[in-house]
Image: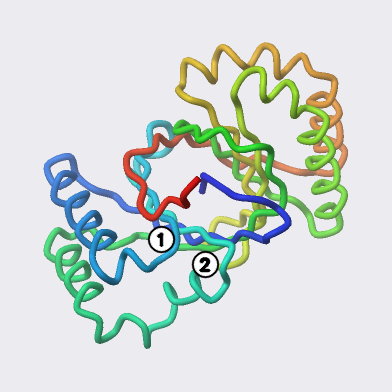
Amino acid sequence: MCATFTTQAQTSWINWEFNVPPQKQEAFVGALNAFFTSETGKKLPMAYLTEQTLGNNEVTHHVSVLSEDADGIGKMLDPSNWQKNKDYQAMGQAMTELGTLPIRSFTGMLIVQSSLKGNGFQMIYSMNVPFDQMMPFTDVFQNVVKKMQPLLNEVSAEMSLSQHIAGDDRGVTHYAVESHKSYADYLKAQNKLMQSPEFGKMFEAMGQGNITNPSTIARTMLMMWNAPSE
């Protein structure tokens, strides 16, 4: 889950998780690159490949597609657009032969986003928010991001919050994402961020609302396709 646009445009995303053995990673990346640089792939929304650098051993890579255009991203889940498409078929055949078909896929919508920095290292916090706490939690998170924007600019960090829509089986309702240029930059920024009074208010609200953080992973950007022009 990661690189994002703006809350006003209601950016949605789809994420596919893979478990790719080391000896197959080069061919796996090659198959993805061949697809997203094909005639079909170039017409799709922005997509990126990340490597999971911290987390469980079940997942090694993520492919994420995200867009402000509902029709554009909707094509990714519409069988009529890819069942007879040669570029989709070529990628599917390559993934089948490699034994690297997705082990899980899910979709969500961005609801809060700080200013973008183009960072490539992401800390992703899976959140389980009770239904009656979803609106208060979103309001608190949005207020925190707004008030912390000057500090986020200072440490070149991004913060965002997405709401899970469908497709996963781990009881996650939201994903909070903090991104930095690197893991070292993440560590250097933590002291300043954690001392922020806004952060304290957010943790206090989470504690009162029975909100849990089932898992936290880290991802590193490897490749990006169809990035929007400046």
Q: Secondary structure at mark 2?
A: loop
Residue under numbered circle 2 = 167
The x, y position of residue 167, in whole percent, is: 52, 67
The x, y position of residue 205, in whole percent, is: 86, 36
Task: Give the Cα separation between the discs numbered 2 and 1.
Answer: 8 Å
Tag 1: residue type? Answer: Arg
> In the drawing, does residue 78 fall left or right of residue 187?
left
> In the drawing, does residue 193 fall left or right of residue 218?
right
Say if 103 sits above or below 142 in the image.
below
Q: Residue at the location (52% across, 45% down)?
A: 2
Whether tag 2 and tag 1 are in contact, CB under 8 A, the answer is: yes
> In the drawing, does residue 212 fall left or right of residue 126?
right
Q: Residue at the location (53% across, 76% down)?
A: 71
Q: Quadrant of residue 195?
A: top right
Q: Quadrant of residue 216?
A: top right
Rate crowding at label 1 as few (under 14), some (14 to 19) or many (20 or more) other CA atoms within 10 Å.
some
Residue under numbered circle 1 = 104
Q: Residue at the location (80% across, 42% down)?
A: 142
Tag 2: residue type? Answer: Gly
Q: Quadrant of residue 37?
A: bottom left
